[in-house]
Image (tube, grey):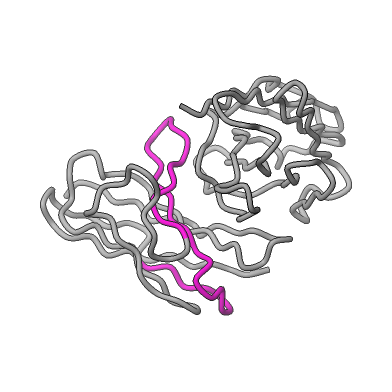
């Protein structure tokens, strides 16, 4: 069964930085695009970023462009999200999610359990 | 950005009843629409992709229809485990994926 396990969340001050990780297992990680999706407390879902299977193509939501960087290490089966210049409105549960097929589809068939990021002074 | 509007915001129904959820796009997304179910404290789960295709392991009581700007998720007969929040998501614009605001299906 596909497993995605996020880590790295916590409390950070406005303007600070945090790096999230997502450890993947039980599928061929290097064959699939991956995403980060977030959910503010009590709110809906917001797509954050995408990285192609080989790391050579990345897309970002306008709300995080220039502040967040998605990356991956296929040798470690791990996805990352480097978050800089954090704002209160970045407070959310951050999910990593797997693209549905090896041909990039930009929808999500498996999700991790999420990691909470709280931006507060 | 493609805006997805879901209605109603809340649907109050009894087990065994039929649920009809709507998702309307601000511009055509062809058939590039997915539906997800989310229960409290859990991650979302993919139900339907490309408007009408059930994901692996999804019961046949869930069905999706529509194309262009108007889409429907139907649950033919609600089971107790179906009470949850449902989101639609478009993948027509790859550089700006968007979700609808969600429909909560609650027990009447």
**Quadrant in the picture for residue B84:** top left
Q: Does residue A118 lie above or below A69 as drawn? A: above
Query: Residue B87 location in percent, x, y?
Result: 45, 54
Query: Residue A108 location in percent, x, y?
Result: 54, 46
Magenta-span inclusion, residue B42: yes
Q: How many marks?
A: 0
The residue that appears at 73% across and 37% down in the rendered structure is A88
Magenta-span inclusion, residue B37: yes
The residue that appears at 43% across and 68% down in the rendered structure is B23
Query: Residue A64 location in percent, x, y?
Result: 79, 47
Q: Does residue B95 lie above or below A30 as drawn? A: below
Front residue of A10/B71: it is B71
Q: Is B33 left, or right, of B76 in this rendering? A: right
Q: Is B64 left, or right, of A12 in this rendering? A: left
Farthest residue to the left: give it: B16
| Span colored in magenta | B22-49
Q: Can residue A33 be seen in this view?
A: yes
Front residue of B22/A22: it is A22
Q: Is B58 left, or right, of A93 in this rendering? A: left
Query: Residue B79 location in percent, x, y?
Result: 17, 44
Front residue of B36/B26: it is B36
The residue that appears at 59% across and 68% down in the rendered structure is B3
Q: Can residue A35 be seen in this view?
A: no
On-image quarter of the C terminus of chain A: top right
């Amino acid at each position: 069964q596909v497993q995605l396990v996020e880590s790295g969340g916590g409390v950070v001050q406005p303007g600070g930085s945090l790096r999230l990780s997502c450890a993947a297992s039980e599928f061929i990680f290097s064959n699939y695009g991956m995403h980060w999706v977030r959910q503010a407390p009590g709110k809906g879902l917001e797509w954050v970023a995408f990285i192609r299977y080989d790391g050579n193509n990345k897309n970002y939501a306008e709300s995080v462009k220039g502040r967040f960087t998605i990356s991956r290490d296929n040798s470690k089966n791990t996805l990352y999200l480097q978050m800089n210049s954090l704002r209160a409105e970045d407070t959310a549960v951050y999910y990593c999610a797997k693209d549905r097929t090896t041909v990039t589809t930009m929808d999500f068939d498996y999700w991790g359990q999420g990691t909470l990021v709280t931006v507060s002074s | 950005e493609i805006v997805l509007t879901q209605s109603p915001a809340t649907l109050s129904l009894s087990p065994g009843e039929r649920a009809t959820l709507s998702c309307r796009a601000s511009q055509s997304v062809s058939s590039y629409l997915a539906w997800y179910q989310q229960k409290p404290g859990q991650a979302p789960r993919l139900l339907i992709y490309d408007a009408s295709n059930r994901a692996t392991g999804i019961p046949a009581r869930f069905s999706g229809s529509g194309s262009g700007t108007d889409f429907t998720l139907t649950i033919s007969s609600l089971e107790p485990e179906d009470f949850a929040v449902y989101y639609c998501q478009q993948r027509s614009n790859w550089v700006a994926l968007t979700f609808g605001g969600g429909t909560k299906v609650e027990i009447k």
